[in-house]
Amino acid sequence: MLYRALANLDAGKTQIKEGDVFPGNVLGDKARAKLEQVGAIKPCSSPPLAALPGWKTRAEKFEPAGVITVENLIDMPDGSIAELFEVSLDRVTLWKRDALDWLKAPRSTGG
Amino acid sequence: MTDSTTIVNACDVSFWVDNASGTPVDISGTANSVTITIEQNVGDSRVFGSRWPRRKMCGHDCTIDYTILYSTAEDEALDIFRDWSILDDPGARTVKIYIPDKNVGSDFYSGEFVLDSMEIPATAGEGKPIEVTGSLMIDGALALSKVAT
């Protein structure tokens, strides 16, 4: 499941900014439950890949593999995606980051 | 509005300061008060015909007023702050404060701070442990986040 950070999160070596969307397995189960309880994170609905700007063609190629939504993409092992598309693992990492970045809430710059 | 269920006290606040080697040290055991003051730089103006000011804001500042207890062991609060205060080039250090504690979901305030002052009182006849007070001033931005591990 994907989550949206409603506050900046300090997870030791991992820093998650408010508004970022991230896979739930980045945090431990207990931490996830506690942060959801205090309102610091919330499950995030996952749009279809085809709805992301610049992803229409790639989404059509993912569809036969059962990867329809951003969450499906994030859950699919990197190795499987690399094999399916005959691309490098680095490329897969970039795709996943790009998909999550499109779900980020824009940050206020003050005023 | 219904009563809040998330009101906290400061019993288990966790206070960390980098020592001279840049290693974060938990000084909670010899500290008993921190006051984080966040200010805005506010300017006001008035115009003819209006009885009320208009205000503009630009810029933030943050100070931490601390109270630590005088102890004689190395790498406890006094030792760290005292060494910091007498260095020729003290520099800024990372200060971290966790409220209400260091558990997941707690608020975490952190930033680079310079040591502005330290006062060590010594009063004859006073039985209470010596409380050393002073203040830190921020060098850069104050970061606020939630503890997630």
Image (cartoon, grey):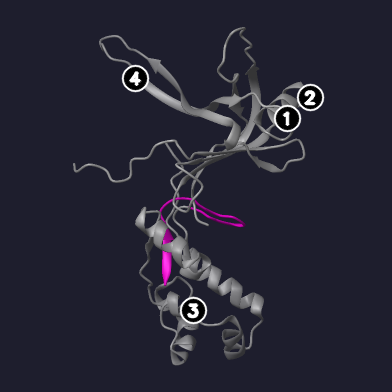
* Pair 2/1: label in front: 2
Q: CA distance from mark 2 to mark 1?
A: 9 Å
Assess whether mark 1 and mark 2 are in contact (beta carbons under 8 angstroms). yes
- Residue A77 painted magenta: no
Residue B56, by quadrant, is top left
- Residue that protrudes farthest toward the bottom in the picture: A64
Assess whether mark 1 and mark 4 are in contact (beta carbons under 8 angstroms). no
Which range of residues does the magenta coloring cover? A1-17
What's the residue at 54%, 37% (across, down)?
B142
Residue A31: horizontal and vertical position, in percent? 46, 60
Task: In the rendered structure, find residue B87 and report the number of the disc placed on it.
Answer: 2
Residue A43: horizontal and vertical position, in percent? 37, 65
Residue B126 appears left or right of A22:
right
Q: What residue is disc 1 on? A: B91
Q: Chain of mark 1?
A: B
- Residue A102 in view, yes or no: no
Task: In the rendered structure, find residue B54 and report the number of the disc placed on it.
Answer: 4
What amino acid is found at the position of numbered circle 2 in the picture?
Answer: Leu
Q: Chain of mark 2?
A: B
Task: In the rendered structure, find residue A75 and report the number of the disc placed on it.
Answer: 3
Does dot 3 land on a helix, a strand or a loop? helix
What amino acid is found at the position of numbered circle 3 in the picture?
Answer: Asp
What amino acid is found at the position of numbered circle 1 in the picture?
Answer: Gly
* Pair 2/4: label in front: 2
Q: Earlier in the sequence, mark 2 or mark 4?
A: 4
Q: CA distance from mark 3 to mark 2?
A: 52 Å
In the image, A23 versus B25, the foreground residue is B25
What's the residue at 45%, 50% (across, down)?
A107
* Pair 4/1: label in front: 1
